[in-house]
Amino acid sequence: MEQLLQQIEDIKKEITDAEAANAAALEEFRIKYLGTKGLVKQIMGEMKNVPNEQKKEFGQILNAFKIVAEEKFAALQAGLGDSAEAETGMDFSLPGDPTPVGTRHPLNLVRNQMVSIFKRLGFAVAEGPEIEDDWHNFGAMNLPEDHPARDMQDTFYVEEKTADHSAWLLRTHTSSTQARVMESQKPPIRVICPGRVYRNETISARAHCFFHQVEGLYIDENVSFADLKQTLYFFVQEMFGKEVKVRFRPSYFPFTEPSAEMDISCQICAGKGCNICKHTGWVEILGSGMVHPKVLENFGIDPEKYTGFAFGMGVERIAQLKYQVNDLRLYSQNDVRFLQQFKSV
Ligand code: DAH
């Protein structure tokens, strides 16, 4: 007993005299006295050898001993903090520099929102290659080689056709993904195909040599034009709010019959008339129609049994209406000042 008390006194003295010049020394102190195998724990372990009638008194001595060690540790730690600040001349209580967090590209935000709306209607996402062959981009979509409608889309050709393969090109529309899907899936088909497309256009505020589309394709028994209208109406209401008005205009696309373009009430001027809607109050946002029987036949789908609708729309156009961006070039210039504005939809 005597011996143990003496030992405690000795260690206490050691603790009181201890110094820690740096973090490593502080850690050494902690391990030596307060660690799981440290001296405080060891001495505490002696409690079992103390006779019962002395346990209470000895317990108090031990507690006081432990507090000495802990307080010394706290004091050394505090001292170290101060000295580090003094040494470096830095104020460690200042808040740190925030790490700049990136933002999503506005086109991605809009595309994701578009896709998620159609997903809720049961559409699956399908993707196709950007370097495509003539057949999937044009031929299969009912645009044979000499078809005048090919002029509607100025094409970047990658490789001329050979004896055993049609020409390679950069896809001019995501309708080529329709061809890829019909080639590999049987009806019922319900897909949405987001992607980048290319056209040989002079770059300006209103035109770019690449842009983005979201394509839709729905093939099943008894699919009607009414289904097409309702689906697209639902889409624009989710995208722009319940107030949005729509109108369909007859149009022409080789891959649909009948074909229609859909306008929505201008989201910039609320239909009053502005530059974006060319003072008409309406903005065209997509092309659509009932899938042409010839297109179905190209993929062995029986047009007597199945019907379908398809549509294609520009992501940039939707983003323009959502964010009032008037110059298409901004989307690909990677100017952080522009991009940082788009935190979420
Ligand atoms: N591919 C057309 C374009 O790029 C858009 C389009 C129109 C897609 C009608 C369709 C459709 O699926 O049915 O101008």
Image: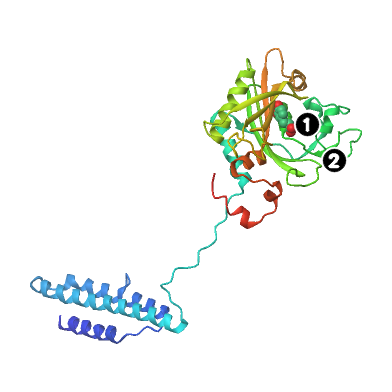
Quarter of image, res 255 = top right
Question: Which residue corresponds to the image point at 21% horizontal and 84% vertical from the top-left?
Answer: 9
Count of numbered labels shown in the rendering: 2
| Left or right of 116 in this view: 166 | right
Q: Does the rendering let one see residue 175? A: no
Q: Earlier in the sequence, mark 1 or mark 2?
A: 1
Amino acid, disc 1? His
Rendering coords of residue 313 (x, y %): 67, 34
Which quarter of the rendered picture does the C terminus lie within?
Answer: top right
Rendering coords of residue 269 (x, y %): 60, 38
Which quarter of the rendered picture does the N terminus lie within?
Answer: bottom left
Viewer-closest of 12 and 181: 181
Up-down: is 304 above or below 342?
above
Do the CB atoms of the residues marked 1 and 2 lie less than 8 Å apart? no
Q: In terms of image quarters, where does ligand 1 lie?
A: top right
Rendering coords of residue 157 (x, y %): 85, 40
**Is the distance from the Cβ of mark 2 to the nearest ligand 1 atom less than 8 Å?**
no
Q: Which residue is mark 2?
A: 157
Quarter of image, res 228 = top right
Question: Which residue corresponds to the image point at 41% horizontal and 78% vertical from the top-left?
Answer: 23
Q: Which residue is mark 1?
A: 136
Up-down: is 45 above or below 326?
below
Q: CA distance from mark 1 to mark 2?
A: 14 Å
Rendering coords of residue 204 (x, y %): 76, 47
| Left or right of 243 in this view: 95 | left
Up-down: is 59 above or below 117?
below
**Is the distance from the Cβ of mark 1 to the nearest ligand 1 atom less than 8 Å?**
no
Amino acid, disc 2? Tyr
| Left or right of 291 in this view: 61 | left
Question: Which residue corresponds to the image point at 47% horizontal and 82% vertical from the top-left?
Answer: 88
